[in-house]
Image (tube, rainbow, N blue to C red):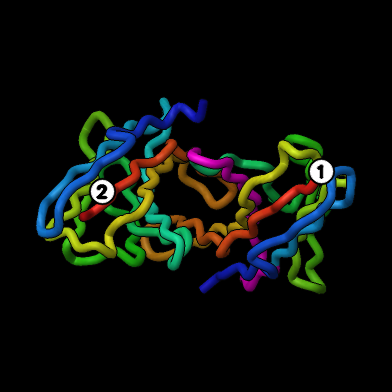
Amino acid sequence: AQSVTQLGSHVSVSEGALVLLRCNYSSSVPPYLFWYVQYPNQGLQLLLKYTSAATLVKGINGFEAEFKKSETSFHLTKPSAHMSDAAEYFCAVSDRGTGGFKTIFGAGTRLFVKA
Amino acid sequence: DSGVTQTPKHLITATGQRVTLRCSPRSGDLSVYWYQQSLDQGLQFLIQYYNGEERAKGNILERFSAQQFPDLHSELNLSSLELGDSALYFCASGRDGANSPLHFGNGTRLTVT
């Protein structure tokens, strides 16, 4: 079965600094990978998705992620953090199981942005 | 706005009781997913329905059940509630397919006292 591992349950950066949130996956080829963001008291929202068209995927709010097959990674980055980026981020993989597709989420990484 | 509507937003009930959570999917989406989010367990997949039929099951307890109706809305029924069932319950909807993202509602916060 496919799975994702997010390294670091909490990440803290200063405003303006680089954001790097790590995600490793285990999957058969091809993997369908996603990053979602959850702001307080809200549901998850899609940030970006990888569907094999390009290894560097650009998402909303200036985030991007690079698919590295050799490292089985799909890390999320943003060059310059804003206070509004403080949220929880989830990496996810879509898995075809019995009867249909199922999305498996990582444990999440909470991003703190310091002024 | 994701287009997914969940009601109620908050629910407070006592142990042993039964509650029903409701979800209306985004227009055009045939799949409905239910997730439970708690501090200790993270985001756990419970169950998926596609066009009225159960498609996949995750870590759903036997005390929990769900269904999807002909108009595609879904209900999650939680019975014999325990303190440990206190959590955020999310519904998500999507198209069928591995590269189709999920669209989440804002959740129902269940508190069991």
Q: Is B15 included in the stretch rendered in magenta?
A: no
Position of A5 with respect to A1 (left or right) is right
Q: Which residue is mark 1?
A: A115
For the point 57% across and 63% down, the residue is A106
Mark carried by residue A94 = none
**Residue A31, image x, y percentages:** 65, 61
Q: Which quarter of the picture shows residue B41? A: bottom left
**In the rendered structure, the residue with mark 1 lies on which chain?**
A
For the point 69% across and 53% down, the residue is A111
**Residue B85, image x, y percentages:** 27, 60
Q: Which quarter of the picture shows residue A73? A: bottom right
Mark 1 is surrounded, within 10 Å at the Cα level, by few (under 14), some (14 to 19) or many (20 or more) other residues, namely few
Number of the front mark, 2 or 1: 1
Mark carried by residue B53 = 2
Between B4 and A83, the one lying in front of the other is: A83
**Residue B31, image x, y percentages:** 38, 42
Mark 2 is surrounded, within 10 Å at the Cα level, by few (under 14), some (14 to 19) or many (20 or more) other residues, namely some
Between B36 and A25, the one lying in front of the other is: B36
SS label for mark 1: loop
Q: Is A41 included in the stretch rendered in magenta?
A: yes
**In the rendered structure, the residue with mark 2 lies on which chain?**
B
Q: CA distance from mark 2 to mark 1?
A: 49 Å
Q: Which quarter of the picture shows residue B10? A: top left
Which span is picked out in magenta? Answer: A24-42
Between A86 and A28, the one lying in front of the other is: A86
